[in-house]
Image: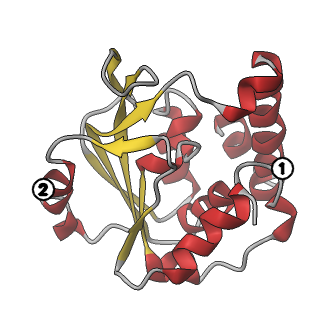
Amino acid sequence: LGPDRNFLASVSLANGDYCWIFGSDDALAKDSLAILQTYLDSQADIYLCDRKETGCDLVEIRNPHRSWLRTDDELYVFNNNLDREIYLSRCLSIGGVFSYLSSLIVKKERWDAIDFDASYIGTSYPHVFIMMSVFNTPGCLLHYISKPLVICRGDNDSFEKKGKARRILIDFIAYLKLANDFYSKNISLKRAF
């Protein structure tokens, strides 16, 4: 199937209220399920958590807390474009706009309601198209969890085998496509994104 189709297929096969998709190179941090459970009362459409970065062995801690937003825990309600622009202004990297798959917990019914655009197959970011579609739905609730619930295993990025510049180009091309597809008619949101 390839990684893009695998991510999509894994959610289609799930039957829970929420889906937390992991790549084979990531792991749950200690007590992460119990910690997540304490947030579920918000009934958010999206939960975004931070990550801890390790070496390839999952032992050597390189970054104990990689934050995606410049804020503590916060529940966001996206009723209009200003709400989205404020959120985007708090993002520290593309992790805040859903690049890192293992940081995302999504309500399955919201994911399933999205009409997937097949042009995102091959971008390495089909999940971001779905997450951005949910994010742009009026009334979307996003709960940011400023805790590293995921362990990211470093030094094994298969995309970097062709060089770091190629890896960055993958991100750039995909996120430029997302910006154009979602915000071509709203320059301030496009800039914030």
Residue 100 is situated, as x and y percent measured from the top left of the image, at 53, 42
* Distance from the alpha carbon under mark 1 to that under mark 2: 38 Å
Left or right: 156 as drawn, with respect to 55: right
The disc at residue 20 is none
Residue nearer the viewer, 160 or 175: 160
Q: Residue at x 49, y 33 (%)?
A: 91
Q: Residues within 10 Å of mark 2 (few under 14, many from 20)?
A: few
As drawn, 4 above or below 138: above
Residue at 45% over, 80% down = 14
Q: Residue 6 lies in what quarter of the image? A: bottom right
- Number of labelled discs? 2
Q: Are marks 1 and 2 in contact (CB under 8 Å)?
A: no
Which residue does the numbered mark 1 point to in the structure image? Answer: 180
* Other residues around mark 1 within 10 Å, as few (<14) / some (14–19) / many (≥20): some
Dot label at residue 34: 2
Task: Indicate the quadrant containing the C terminus: top left, top right, bottom left or bottom right.
Answer: top right
Q: From the viewer's perspective, is residue 93 above or below residue 27?
A: above
Disc 1 residue type (three-letter) = Asn
Q: Secondary structure at mark 2?
A: helix
Q: Is residue 90 visible?
A: yes
